[in-house]
Image (spheres, rainbow, N blue to C red):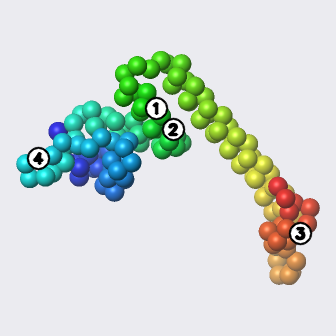
């Protein structure tokens, strides 16, 4: 059992983030010592690791709640987890496609910009909605 400060240090997670995860129910309310210090079990530590890794992989809080709800029920199938993960993967792929379109538009606009000291700038025109690349 470790205190919150040690949990934060070991996990590389901010104290406030741990408090937030407790507040929204991702982490269960920990046990307390007689003096009121929160104590986190190895299971709590593993759960925080799960949450942090999930966030690193881009899972939203709601997606993590769904995954942890399955885990907490002790009655889930790999197929259920795969469905949630597949939906997340589709979202990630959609974001990647959007970013590629954004990259292409920015590259095209930047390529048309000559730089220098002229007042005309295709980048500014695009941001104001004027010119051929105004709408990506």
* SS class, disc 3: loop
Q: Split into 4 quadrants, where in the image is the N terminus? A: top left
Q: Nearer the viewer, residue 119 or 86?
A: 86
Pointer 1 with pointer 2, Cβ within 8 A: yes
State the CA–CA distance, disc 4 to disc 2. 32 Å
Mark 1–mark 3 CB contact (< 8 Å): no
Residue at 39%, 48% in the rendered image = 24
Report the residue at 36% width, 44% height from top. Answer: 25
- Farthest residue to the right: give it: 132
Horizontal and vertical percent for residue 107? 80, 56
Of tags 2 and 3, which is closer to the observer? 2
Disc 4, disc 2: CB below 8 Å? no
Instruction: Locate residue 121: give its quadrant.
Output: bottom right
Q: Which of marks 4 and 2 is nearer the N terminus?
A: 4
Q: Can residue 26 be seen?
A: yes
Query: In percent of the image, x 80 and y 51: which residue is there?
Result: 104
The tag earlier along the polypeptide, 2 or 3, is: 2
Q: Which of 62 and 48 is in front in this view?
A: 62
In the image, 31 versus 42, the foreground residue is 31
* Label 4 – label 3 distance at C-alpha: 64 Å
Relative to 107, residue 125 above or below: below
Q: Dot 2 lies on which element?
A: helix
Question: Which disc is residue 67 wearing?
Answer: 1
Q: Height in image: 38 above or below 70?
A: below
Q: Which mark is residue 63?
A: 2
Q: Distance between the residues labelled 1 and 3?
A: 45 Å
Q: Could you tell me residue 85's position as x and y percent?
A: 56, 30
The kind of secondary structure element at disc 1 is helix
Secondary-structure class at tag 4 = loop
* The disc label shown at residue 130, or none: 3
């Amino acid at each position: 059992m470790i205190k919150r400060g040690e949990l934060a240090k070991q996990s590389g997670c901010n104290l406030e983030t741990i408090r937030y995860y407790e507040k929204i129910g991702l982490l269960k309310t920990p046990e307390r010592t007689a003096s009121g210090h929160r104590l986190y079990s190895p299971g709590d530590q593993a759960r925080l690791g799960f949450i942090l890794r999930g966030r690193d992989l881009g899972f939203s809080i709601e997606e993590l709640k769904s995954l942890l709800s399955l885990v907490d029920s002790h009655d889930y199938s790999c197929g259920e987890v795969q469905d949630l993960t597949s939906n997340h993967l589709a979202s990630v792929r959609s974001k990647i496609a959007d970013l590629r379109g954004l990259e292409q538009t920015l590259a095209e606009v930047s390529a048309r910009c000559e730089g220098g000291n002229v007042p005309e700038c295709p980048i500014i025109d695009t941001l104001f909605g004027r010119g051929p690349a105004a709408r990506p």
